[in-house]
Structures are given as C-alpha cells and as structure tokens.
Image: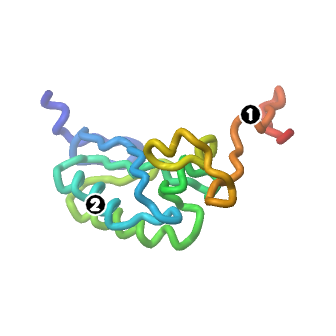
Amino acid sequence: MGALFEPLTLRGVTVRNRIVVSPMCEYSSADGFANEWHLVHLGSRAVGGAGLVFTEAAAVEAAGRISPQDLGIYRDEHVKNLAQIAAFIHEQGRSAVYSWRTPDAKRASRGRGKAARRLRPRRVGGVRSWRRAHCRFSPMGRSRTR
C-alpha cells in the first residue's frame, strides 16, 4: 500500500500520488460550458489529495456529445471556464488535470435520467447522430463515408 502515496511520473508529468479521479459523466453543463458544479466537484477531489483528476468527456463538437448536458470544448468560449478549473486544481499542490475528449454521438440526442431511454427529436434539441456505422474503412486503414 505504500506505493499508493508515492509520486508517479508518466510521460514527463509527475503527480504527487497514485490516487486518480476517473472521468464521470456529470450531465451538468449548459451548451457545453463548465460551471460552478464542475469547479466544486473536480476541485474538491484535488483538495482531498487526488494526484490526478480527469474531467468528464468533453465533446469536440456539439453533435458529438453523449447528451445535451455534457461538457464541450467545441467553441473557443469553452476554454475559459475549463482553464479556471485547471488553475484551481493546480493551486492545490502537484495535482494534474486532464480532459477526456470524445466524438461519441451515438447518444447525443438523449435526455437525462429516465428521459435517456428516448431519443429527442431535432426540433427540441436533438442532433443528427453519426456513429461508427456511418464510416467504412479501406484495407489501408483510411476512412471514408458512405
């Protein structure tokens, strides 16, 4: 158990211990923006001593969100709030913060909770979902759309 509290270096980044907060879908964003919820949720893990903190999945495009309430990094304006959270986490010691980016759109038109069982139509915020099934791969590994 002693190794749990020892520093760990991965690809040039050293964290103060091996306690890692894994990415969790929080369904708390509006239009992809991180907010006070994210600051408190992730920041409190750093204050508690976690060496590495991951954000929830951050979609690289609006249509790629897992749900309409997911975090995004598809607009320049998203960076400011995420940078504030990262700065707070770094102020707590040798904690590192990473963002898990995702192009996952297979559930982008689903709601929260029990509403996640049904797809939302485009007229009320649903998006056209692109999935792996929409792409074919050539034998050389280059993708092409149907």
Q: Residue 15 carries which label?
A: none
- Quadrant showing the C terminus: top right
Specify whether 56 is left or right of 88. Answer: right
Seen in the picture, residue 3 relative to 21 is either above or below; the reply is: above
The residue carrying mark 2 is: 89
C-alpha gap between disc 1 and disc 2: 38 Å
The colour scheme is rainbow
**Residue at x 50% of width, y 53% of height:** 58
Q: Which residue occupies the extreme left position in the image?
A: 2
User: SS of the residue at dot 1?
Assistant: helix
User: SS of the residue at dot 2?
Assistant: helix
- Callout 1 amino acid: Ala
Seen in the picture, residue 75 relative to 114 is either above or below; the reply is: below
* Residue 60: percent from left, percent from top: 59, 55
- Pick the front one: 75 or 88: 75
* Residue 81: percent from left, percent from top: 41, 69
Seen in the picture, residue 133 relative to 103 is either above or below; the reply is: above
**Residue at x 32% of width, y 53% of height:** 96
Q: Are marks 1 and 2 in contact (CB under 8 Å)?
A: no
**Residue at x 47% of width, y 64% of height:** 30
Quadrant of residue 143 within the rendered picture: top right
**Residue at x 48% of width, y 68% of height:** 79
* Residue 61: percent from left, percent from top: 62, 57
Q: Which mark is residue 133?
A: 1
